[in-house]
Image (cartoon, helix red, strand yellow):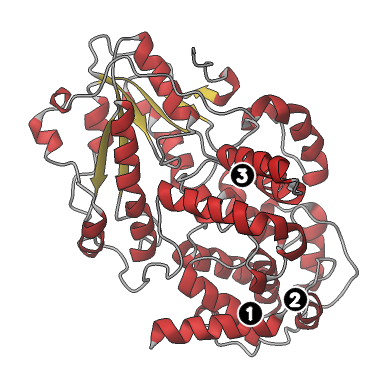
């Protein structure tokens, strides 16, 4: 069976350089989609390699100087490396992982690998480091640099402008979706990888990552060691697939009724794995659709979140650029109502340190913050409440935004993601509508503790987080 080529609307050529005529391999730089399967970028690298009778080398790097670099993020990323390495070996691709442990360590590995490559393929991703790299690296690389969209089910390029809500992007996605809901075809590699294609001095810099070595590797890095690994999540493709299996067999049938009840544990818990690319949204969507059809279950609500809402966030990040961390990108009605209510007295005022330490007067908010501190995620429904209260208890809207972003940068395994930025700015009115006027919020949607008590089992959630906190801080 011949693999179907990766569609052209997933591919962006980011420079005009010519391929290296006497190359040793095609280089795939896995920045965000750190997996060996269901990966359009890797498939495209394989297409180029086969067309030029070359092998594929996959490069993954982890540096020590990204914003808020700490043990939690480092550990989760490193836990995914053995899975990727094994799966790449199985298909005949090479794998080169480099851990930059300190600021004096080599920081040119990509360029040294590219110096022997025909061309570079990487991930088209509209936020954080990948977006920065895809702006600055292509003109310095000296060979073709191509970015491929492996994050969205419907390619980002099919949306020619920014959508202003789910109601505008939903019909566009539905028109395109059927054609996009097909497994990713990975071409069989004609040329298999051999380590002797790299010089010994470069191979000596490659980091060997085994599960048992991860704690010592993390400890060797010049990062913040006070932020401990998640007590809930282990990184990697195997862990992601296990989470998906649990969701299908135990939670999908409960999702529509119980997903907004944090204490019921009816969600997929896949957001960290989607963020770091340990699993593909397309793989999840097809598995959920097929399982639901086979077992006569309802999957529409979950697929709405996974596809429509998630891809609305990618669309927003794509057109917002660096403004994803700014209130300036909000609709005019949001900015007007915040300006009108900027001087309103706040019922409580907390410092960033008090928020971080979960020492507010609100036991539900504190529990949500402790979940973030312990697990690296907050249940989506309570995360909305968490954000709304930071607005209500901060001196300014700008202070509230900085607090939310900072806490996600440090603690959230699904932070620095288009979904993260979109959901934070949703608290300030993005992708929402004006509501009734009230102090501090103006026309922004308001959420209350009493409302949470009516709609969710607050007591059960607080008891669970309290017990977990006690168990892991004893």
Which residue position is annotated with label 2?
A: 456
Which residue position is annotated with label 1?
A: 461
Asked whether 103 or 276 is in front, the reply is: 276
Q: Which mark is residue 317?
A: 3
Query: Upstream in the sequence, badge 1 or badge 2?
Result: 2
Query: Upstream in the sequence, badge 2 or badge 3?
Result: 3
- Where is 327 relative to 50, above or below? below
Asked whether 292 or 259 is in front, the reply is: 292
Instruction: State yes or no: discs 1 and 2 in contact (Cβ < 8 Å).
Output: yes
Which residue: 15% across, 42% down? 205
Instruction: State yes or no: discs 3 and 1 in contact (Cβ < 8 Å).
Output: no
Residue occupying the far left of the picture = 200
Q: Position of residue 266 (x, y in %)?
A: 65, 63
Cα distance, mark 1 to mark 2?
9 Å
- Where is 377 relative to 297, above or below? below
Which residue: 62% across, 30% down? 155
């Amino acid at each position: 069976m011949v693999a179907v080529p990766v569609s052209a609307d997933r591919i962006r050529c980011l420079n005009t350089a010519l391929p290296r005529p006497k190359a040793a391999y095609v280089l795939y730089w896995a920045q965000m989609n750190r997996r060996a399967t269901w990966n359009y970028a890797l498939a495209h690298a394989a297409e180029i390699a086969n067309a030029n009778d070359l092998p594929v080398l996959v490069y993954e790097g982890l540096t020590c100087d990204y914003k808020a670099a700490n043990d939690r993020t480092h550990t989760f990323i490193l836990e995914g490396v053995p899975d990727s390495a094994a799966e790449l070996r199985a298909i005949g691709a090479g794998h080169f992982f480099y851990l930059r442990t300190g600021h004096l360590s080599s920081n040119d590995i990509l360029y040294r690998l590219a110096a022997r490559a025909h061309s570079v393929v990487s991930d088209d991703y509209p936020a954080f480091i990948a977006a920065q790299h895809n702006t600055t690296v292509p003109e310095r690389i000296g060979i073709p640099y191509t970015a491929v969209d492996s994050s969205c089910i419907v390619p980002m390029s099919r949306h020619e402008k920014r959508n202003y809500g789910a109601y505008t992007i939903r019909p566009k996605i539905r028109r395109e979706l059927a054609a996009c809901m097909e497994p990713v075809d990975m071409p069989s590699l004609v040329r298999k990888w051999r380590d002797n294609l790299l010089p010994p001095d470069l191979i000596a810099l490659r980091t060997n990552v085994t599960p048992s070595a991860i704690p010592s590797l993390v400890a060797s890095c010049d990062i913040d060691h006070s932020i401990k690994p998640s007590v809930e999540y282990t990184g990697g493709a195997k862990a992601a697939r296990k989470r998906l299996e649990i969701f299908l067999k135990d939670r999908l049938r409960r999702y529509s009724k119980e997903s907004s009840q944090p204490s019921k544990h009816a969600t997929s818990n896949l957001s960290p794995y989607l963020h770091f690319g340990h699993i593909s949204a397309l793989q999840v969507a097809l598995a959920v659709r097929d399982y639901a059809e086979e077992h006569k279950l309802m999957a529409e609500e979950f697929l709405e979140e996974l596809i429509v809402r998630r891809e609305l966030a990618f669309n927003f990040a794509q057109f917002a650029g660096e403004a994803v961390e700014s209130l300036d990108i909000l609709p005019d009605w949001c900015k007007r109502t915040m300006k009108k209510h900027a001087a309103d007295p706040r019922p409580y005022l907390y410092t960033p340190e008090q928020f971080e330490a979960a020492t507010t007067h609100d036991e539900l908010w504190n529990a949500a913050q402790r979940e973030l501190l312990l697990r690296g995620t907050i249940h989506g429904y309570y995360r909305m409440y968490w954000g709304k209260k930071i607005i209500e208890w901060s001196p300014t809207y700008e202070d509230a935004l900085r607090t939310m972003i900072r806490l996600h940068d440090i603690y959230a395994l699904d932070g620095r993601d288009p979904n993260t930025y979109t959901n934070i700015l949703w608290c300030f009115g993005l992708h929402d509508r004006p509501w009734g006027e009230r102090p501090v919020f103006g026309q922004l949607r308001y959420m209350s503790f009493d409302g949470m008590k009516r709609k969710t089992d607050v007591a059960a959630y607080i008891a669970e987080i309290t017990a977990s906190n006690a168990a892991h801080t004893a």
